[in-house]
Image (tube, rainbow, N blue to C red):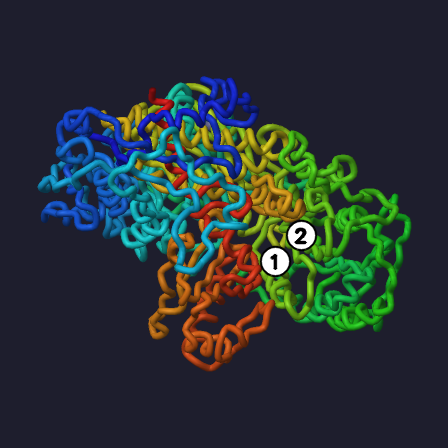
Amino acid sequence: MSQQGYVAAPPYSQAQPGIGGYQGGFGPGPVQPHYGHYGGGAPPTFQAPLTGGMKSPVLPPPVSTPSSPSNQQNGAQPQRYPAAYGQPLQSTAYNSMASSAPPPAMQLTNQMSSLNMGNYAPGPVLQNPPSATSLQQPFRTPPPPQMTLGSQSPHMQSPHMQPPQMAPAPSISMGSPPMGRPFPGAPPPHPGGSRGLQQPGPGPVGPPGYPQQAGPFGGHMAGPHPGPGGFPAGPPQKKLDLDSIPSTIQVIEDDQAKHGGQVFSTNIRGQVPPLVTTNFTVQDQGNASPRFMRCTTYSLPCTSDLAKQCQVPLACIVKPFASLPKNETPLYLVNHGESGPIRCNRCKAYMCPYMQFIEGGRRYQCGFCNCSNEVPVFYFQHLDHMGRRVDLYERPELSLGSYEMVATLDYCKNNKPPNPPAYIFMIDVSYNNVKSGLVRLICNELKTLLDMLPREEGADNSPVKVGFVTYNKTLHFYNVKSSLSQPQMMVVSDMAEMYVPLPDGFLVDFQESRAVICNLLTQIPDMFADTNESETVFAPVIQAGVEAFKEADCSGKLFIFHSSMPTAEAPGKLKNRDDKKLVNTEKEKTLFQPLKGTYEQLSKDCVAQGCCVDLFLFPNQYVDVATMADVSLHTGGSVFKYNNFQVEMDGEHFLQDVRKEVQKSIGFDAIMRVRTSTGFRATDFFGGIHMKNTTDVEMAAVDCDKAVTVEFKHDDALNEETGALIQCALLYTTISGQRRLRILNLSLNCSSHLSELYKCCETDSLVNFFAKSAYRAILNQPLKNIKEILVNQTAHMLACYRKNCASASVASQLILPDAMKVFPVYMNSLMKTSPLTGSTELSTDDRAYQRLSVMAMGVEDTQLLLYPRLIPLHNMDVANEAPPAPLRCTEERLADSGVFLLENGHTMFLWLGQASPPDVIQGLFNAPSLAHLQGNMSVLPELDNPLSKKVRAIMRDLLEKSPKSMKLQIVRQKDKPEMMFRQFLVEDKGLHGGTSYVDFLCYVHREIKQVLT
Ligand SMILES: [Zn+2]
């Protein structure tokens, strides 16, 4: 049975003189990268495209190539797809399998064949059997037979582990599609004559009249590569159609169609979950919900040699506080009493479904280290005839993938129960912030927002205490004790030794001190209304927060609202070190490196105290975000940046962010430990974290949007039968000051066949891993190296699949694993993001900001960031409740007469085509035409008509789902701000360099071929 997933046979892949010349430009050999995975293996043999300079591959005329026999790739059971582009012949059998063979794959083959294969032979074009795709369907994947044979340790996929009351999800009963069944179709006539494929340099064709890729858009790109000799006169050249290459939108839609609205039960080991973009419900039946843990692959290679061979990173993205939809059960709380949670004596793993009870229930064998442990007397329970504890389903820790455990005093600092956390609001009251109206805006908002502080389920009040500081060159603390009639201010001007001048009355209960606090919030804007002070301090502000938490013996969060670079004489004083001359040099990394010293120490102090720092920046110029935001990154805080803040334009956007941030569910003073079964272990961690040693991941706080990406490496061989187990334990303090453990368990398959690994890959998780690892590498390496490695690894991963998992086929075919079909588009998009774009036109702070934002992102967020949502609004059915289906992110999908919404979790654009229908403009803006619109709009007027209501509802929905608020930018086609919008059309060429998706795919294909030869 073939494992091929995705087949194409582009003629561009022929080794040609015109392309060969390209390689020479890189000199004798690639720079040896420092960054990379499995660096110990063979040195990379690929070359990355030069930034912005990748030549469009142009195909010389077809050379003579062996024909049909060598095209029969699928061995014994060839699948024949008709090659007539656009109208595949489908037998009935094929139709019944429609979902297992993605239409784009077919189209690609069809088009490719019409372009290429047809040139050489009239023979059939053979494609991947549907089985390759159908194997990807998680619901249909039966547990490997050996897993059900009552092996030594319990596995979740064993039927007896399934709670009897739970019916299997309907999809499970659908059964597997027939495997390897031929779907004959008449070989279509191939287009006669020879055809070449040309990648025109200027990029995809846009709407008529639009300056495509010219000028600003095409400036960095080389034109079409003529190739020696060019094309001989002959038949017309044909451009590679976008519709013929894998589409992210299609993949998302297919997965939604397959799994949308269904229940995903986590009872099967190594089961690949639906995509993050799919709406599904999770039922925990022994493995952690994919909302908490997602892996790059659900089948690990058995040996490190295999892992090195394929170079697919083995990683898990853990989002321990992920929000659950209302219809999913919140985590149960387990209490093992005074002696604390039951753990393996040797490896300290917590009691979980992977512990196997033996000797009549008196002992249990640890699934992680195999140690045999005694069952504590109070925990003893008899086993049934199947060897299961009879209380299995009464105990979440024996039957569920995720649960919480009560932590005893041993798990608390100084063996003392913690106090509830506190939130301190620290407002920069220097000239800029006062003048912009920001200080007043914040103070007004806090009066109502403080009623929304997080609270335990069902509680009337929040246990979170609050405190207030204002500052410029000095710090002002406020006593807001409830017994006072007026708040009192205490000024600290000694910045070198920060202390909190108020032993009492600084951190208070909002409900009790409401009157005094509201009084204070009313007074603050007036107190500083006439300030001329423009200098600020910054590090002492954070230090003050840490000291306040120390004093109160609690953890907590600082909300810092800051405007400018801290230039006042104080620890952590910064100076402008922005230098555009460093861009694209070896030293570019220094722009991203935070200054060490004060800030490094501050991060450690914060983490030690459980002090999380949220930073809201309002800069008018460079402020050294790389340094200023570093403490936030390492303390699990969030960073927000509002360039040239204006209350009217940005006020609401900012307030939405503060509201989300204040109300978020969050845990404090956290420490995470990832344990694994023998044979592999966690070796690297990416996220808003601090590592004191190699195993303990410390986080001052972790909220519902923060994720840690964990990379695994082999220690030894893994066992196919027992699989691989991961237990992630997060010890933290709740909002009400309880010490708890959140335990997340996940079991994966292991295989000595790489085809299994590729089949169980998760592109969105892979991309999350690559984004974080590349963004971290920015601190140490030139961008050029990093991009080279990204391209090399992409090609290598795909080449290894081609070599080991796809059956013999002609070299000119591009074959992608079904689960990684759109991996290249994401990788290409990643390389075009601003941190990885060496352009002097980009602001250093903006680049640093994006780098930091991504480091703690979960899979949903990186997916959306790298493939934004583009929604057409001009032709939607306003009566339909669902929003219109998104389109591919390319200029080709825009239309002069269209109106489109684009968002990526950070930014939202409303793009208005120059020929937008007047009724749409009227409906949205109450204006007769585009010409009547004002520039710089950031809100849609609230109009009482169906279109306006519908569009605003779509935007509201998107904003609600997003961790951050997004400022709406309304851009008209051909207006200057439209440039900003265009850089999010990730399938097109980058605004500041970087290739189009089509070109990238061609390039990767060539690289793959090089590896294979
Ligand atoms: Zn153990």
Q: Position of residue 90 (x, y in %)?
A: 13, 47
Residue 1008 found in image quarter:
top left
**Residue drawn at (47%, 34%), measured in percent from left and top?**
376
- Left or right: residue 624 compared with residue 93: right
Which comes before the other along the chain, label 1 or label 2? 2
Residue 170 drawn at (x, y percent) = 23, 52
Whole-percent x and y of residue 923? 45, 78
Q: Residue at x 15, y 40 (%)?
A: 190
Residue at x 82% of width, y 60% of height: 430
Q: Check the picture and name the quadrant holding the N terminus.
A: top left
Establish if 535 lies above or below 309: below
- Amino acid type at image mark 1: Glu
Q: Amino acid at mark 2?
A: Asp
* Mark 2 residue element: strand
Q: Secondary structure at mark 1?
A: helix
Marks 1 and 2 close (CB-CB < 8 Å):
yes
Q: Is residue 531 left or right of residue 433?
A: right
Number of numbered tags placed on the structure image: 2
In this orientation, which residue lies closer to the viewer: 929 or 88? 929
| Residue behind mark 2 | 614
811 sits left or right of 654 in the view: left
Residue that carries the numbered disc 1 in the rendered image: 661
